Image (spheres, rainbow, N blue to C red):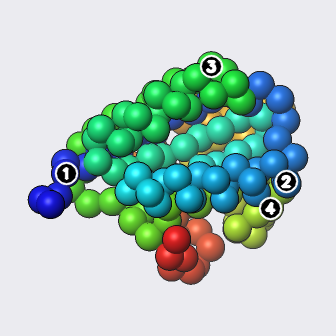
């Protein structure tokens, strides 16, 4: 089967309620499984009741995944900030990488906070707020974050 055109979609949203660490872990495991089946890769950031997610994959499957997210009762105030064709995946080895600013999963919390502050998504008053990301910073932010723990992404 020839390669399907790839699309990258980045969105931010607010959680309808706080997500404890165990619920985030279950979400990550379900997402990894489903995304691997759908050939979707990406990154999910969570903190302070906010999500930022990068989805990459065949256009029709990225669209279907985002459509499911749009009706997921855990999300409100969804805002798509990037939707573009890409030739190569930025998170090709991650069916889903979860990084929690609240629970310190997957990445050292101090390093994550440094990266978040660098891209103006953390304020002293409001914590992690991905709605403040400027559209043209998303790619640089995602690239920096993907290498922030100094390790190669783990295979799914």
Tell me the distance, in whole angstroms, between the alpha carbons under discs 4 and 3: 24 Å
**Residue 132 visible in rendering:** no
Horizontal and vertical percent position of residue 90: 38, 60
- Residue 151 disc label: none
Tell me the distance, in whole angstroms, between the alpha carbons under discs 1 and 4: 35 Å
For marks 1 and 4, the one nearer the N-term is 1
Vertical order, 145 against 81 (above or below): below
Tell me the distance, in whole angstroms, between the alpha carbons under discs 1 and 2: 35 Å
Tell me the distance, in whole angstroms, between the alpha carbons under discs 2 and 4: 9 Å
For marks 4 and 3, the one nearer the N-term is 3
For marks 3 and 1, the one nearer the N-term is 1
| Residues packed near mark 2 inside 10 Å, few (<14), some (14 to 19) or many (20 plus) | some
- Residue 21 disc label: 2
**67 to the left or right of 111:** left
Q: Which residue is under mark 4?
A: 104
Quarter of the picture containing the N terminus is bottom left
For marks 1 and 2, the one nearer the N-term is 1
Element carrying mark 2: helix
Residue drawn at point x = 66 percent, y = 59 percent: 29
Tell me the distance, in whole angstroms, between the alpha carbons under discs 2 and 3: 22 Å
Q: Which residue is under mark 1?
A: 4
Element carrying mark 3: strand
| Residues packed near mark 4 inside 10 Å, few (<14), some (14 to 19) or many (20 plus) | some
Q: Is the C-beta separation of discs 2 and 3 under 8 Å? A: no
């Amino acid at each position: 089967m020839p390669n399907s055109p790839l699309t990258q979609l980045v969105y931010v949203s607010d959680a309808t309620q706080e997500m404890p660490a165990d619920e985030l872990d279950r979400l990550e495991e379900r997402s990894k499984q489903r995304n691997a089946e759908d050939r979707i890769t990406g990154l999910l950031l969570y903190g302070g009741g906010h999500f930022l997610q990068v989805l990459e994959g065949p256009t029709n499957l990225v669209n279907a995944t985002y459509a499911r997210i749009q009706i997921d009762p855990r999300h409100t105030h969804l805002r798509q900030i990037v939707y573009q064709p890409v030739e190569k995946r930025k998170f090709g080895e991650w069916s889903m990488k979860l990084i929690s600013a609240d629970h310190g999963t997957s990445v050292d919390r101090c390093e994550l906070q440094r990266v978040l502050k660098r891209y103006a998504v953390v304020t002293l008053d409001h914590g992690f707020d991905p709605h403040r990301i400027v559209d043209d910073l998303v790619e640089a932010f995602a690239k920096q974050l993907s290498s922030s723990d100094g390790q190669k992404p783990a295979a799914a």
